[in-house]
Image: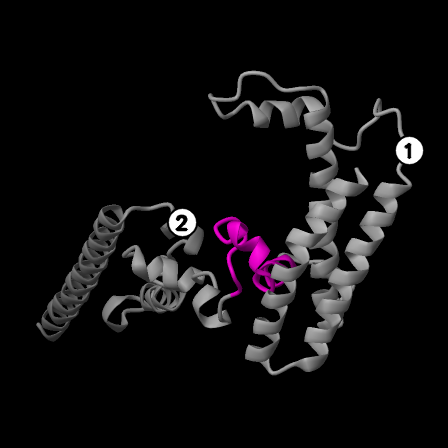
Amino acid sequence: MAHQASDMYEQSSPSASSAVVASAGAQGSTSSQQQQLQFAQEFWEEQIVTAEQFDSDFKNHPLPLARIKKVMKSDPEVKMISAEAPILFSKACEIFICEITRRAWLHAEESKRRTLQKSDVANAVSRSDQFDFLIDIVPREESPRSSRRPTTRENTVASGIPSEEQQRQYSQYYAQGAGGLTGYTHAIEGSPFYQSMSPEQFQQYVQYQQQAAQSYQAQQQEQQQHQASSSRGGSVVHAG
């Protein structure tokens, strides 16, 4: 176990060091470079000492060996697996998780935070070439502008549904009455209602509201004309 941990250290440390130097040179941070180099040296020395002093009957494992064996057999060319192989992979996975976690924690401390976040893991992966195979799983950090998620306003406009501002103006228009009419108090539903409608349904709904407003306006004009004619008729009778 100690020999295997030593081999892992020899394979990991040079690449980790070169990756750290390149990253630190790009960032112009000598202190960060020294911190990463010191971490790599201390971490693997600690793992080697732990492996040399490791004493176990290999009956209890922190990771499920059956699951590890199943992953190993995902390759159809693998036919038989010895009992020791999953145990070795279990320890390798344990060290792998521990190293990335501690590298990510260094970034969290640099950011004055006490909670490990996904961005810390992404930063830890990006600072070492040995973790390049994780690039598709843990993408490198992107600028806030390009990585931000679309807002509700952007989603509604892109899908052809009016934004909240447009809905508010539309609501005020019909609440006051189309064409400046008073008494038409129909109010549209809130944005959740529109988000459940397709663009075609919304267009039909708008046309319906416009027709209703025009009908109301025609009724108002008809009532006004009727009142005017009644008033003129009353005046004629009174004059006679």
Task: Please state if 17 lies on the left or on the right of 52 as rendered.
Answer: left
Magenta range = 120-141
The amino acid at mark 2 is Phe
Camera-side residue: 92 or 220? 92
Circle 1: is it few (<14), some (14-19), or many (20+) Cα within 10 Å? few
Residue 56 image position (x, y, % from top left): 89, 29
Label 1 residue SS: loop
| Marks 1 and 2, the one that precedes in the sequence | 1
> Residue 126 sits in which quadrant?
bottom right
Q: Residues within 10 Å of mark 2 (few under 14, many from 20)?
A: few
What amino acid is labelled 1 in the image? Asp
Q: Is residue 116 left or right of residue 225?
A: right
- Asked whether residue 190 appears in the rendered view, the answer is no
Residue 193 numbered mark, or none = 2
The answer to whether 179 is drawn above or below residue 201 in the figure is: below
Residue 178 location in percent, x, y? Answer: 26, 66
User: Where is the C terminus found, in terms of image quarters?
Assistant: bottom left
Give residue 153's quadrant in the image. Answer: bottom left
| Residue at numbered disc 1 | 55
